[in-house]
Amino acid sequence: MKHSLDELLGIVYRYYPRGVGIADDVNEELIRQTEEHARLVAARIQASKDERWHSMLRRIADRFPRTLRNHSLHLTAGGCDGCYSFTIDLRNSTGEPLWFQISFLAPYYIVHRSCTIEIVKELRDSFTVSFRGMLFIVSRSPLDPWLISNPDHESPRTVTVTRRYVAFDLSPDEQPCADWIAHEIEATFGCERMPPEVGTVLVPDVAPGVRLPGEVRLYDCLFSDQHTWVKPSPSEEPARRAEVDVSSLTERFADVLTVLRAHYQIGLILRLPAMVRKLPEPERQSPAVFLSASTDGFLHKDKMIEELARMRPHDESPETLRAMAAKRELEALVAAWDGEGEPPASMVAWASRFLASWPFDRRPGASS
């Protein structure tokens, strides 16, 4: 190795701001405003102009025609990664191409391929159901007869999760190709291969791309954060919830979800227009907003009254005024309810009419 671990960390901190934008959540806008990020973008653009890269890629394409794919076209605009990337598809028994990545931030390269692991996990004693355009996370058993009609006690209580990760050990069929290209890389850039025991070292206090603080490795910073560099551990895979089809719900639970969905829709209409205005223009045109909510399977009168009281309009658009009128109607229905058992038929009927008049594929606050 040309560098010690401390020297490699020093290189990382030259291009990734240490401790910036990661206090409570990752603030990408704050990170983009730093000198380090500007230096990284400039390095990407400069790398895209390096004729050594383009000449080498042509030589490799001549040696392996119709099998090379360039994954670094985005560098001209200063896009993601700290490396050149390309794959060679050998059509071997693994069905996975060989990845070659050359860092332009430090004099190192890597060669790897993708593998998969299947992890069997016990299902949580909770479930999710997609209802009228919203994902509900229900903190009750998917075998609860109050919620699920004819629950299937014989259904599997485990789920198999497939995860992809990087493997650095190559097959005998892949090795000749890897050796030839590695020689080209070393001769062109004067770099050496970074071993996994170095590249998988965790880097504190930075958050490049999709990685969260505490999960970032040297490979993420000096190469790319688009790969899983360490084989996933079954113990670290979170338990999953069962997914229940809406047709399996009891009528009384469907009534609860109908009222909750109308209740959340009102809140969404009242607050979303102001939220949308704060977004950059491309995100403003997003065709959909992902919606989710949690429930224990019941309506709670005191909680609904409290949440309705907190709802305030953020503008005076026709949609907001209409939502305020619906809010007053729901408040009256909730106030008249004794709070026991299932929601009254009048509340369910009102919620059904309200939801039917507000298509879920039309984003509140969007221009028509």
Image (spheres, rainbow, N blue to C red):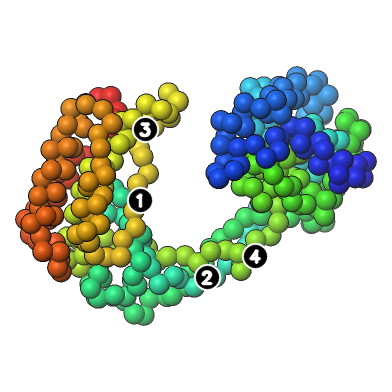
The nearer-to-camera label among 1 and 3 is 3
Mark 2 vs mark 3: give the one in front: 3
Residue behind mark 3: 275
Which mark is drawn over residue 121?
A: 2
Q: Residue 227 or 85: which is nearer the viewer?
A: 227
SS at mark 2 in the image: strand
Crowding around mark 2 (Cα neighbors within 10 Å: few <14, some 14 to 19, many 20+) is some
Determine the secondary structure under disc 4.
loop
Gap between marks 1 and 3, in whole Å? 17 Å
Q: Nearer the viewer, residue 182 or 271?
A: 271
Residue 128 lies in quadrant: bottom left
Query: In this figure, which residue is indicated by the disc labeled 4?
Result: 233
Q: Is residue 330 left or right of residue 33?
A: left
Taking the spot 72% from the left edge, 22% from the top edge, the residue there is: 42
Residue 222 percent location from the top left of the image: 76, 39
Q: Judge the density around disc 3: few (<14), some (14-19), many (≥20) Cα neighbours within 10 Å.
A: few
The amino acid sitting under disc 4 is Ser
Give the position of the C terminus as an image quadrant.
Answer: top left
Q: Residue at x 86, y 46 (%)?
A: 5
Q: Earlier in the sequence, mark 4 or mark 1?
A: 4
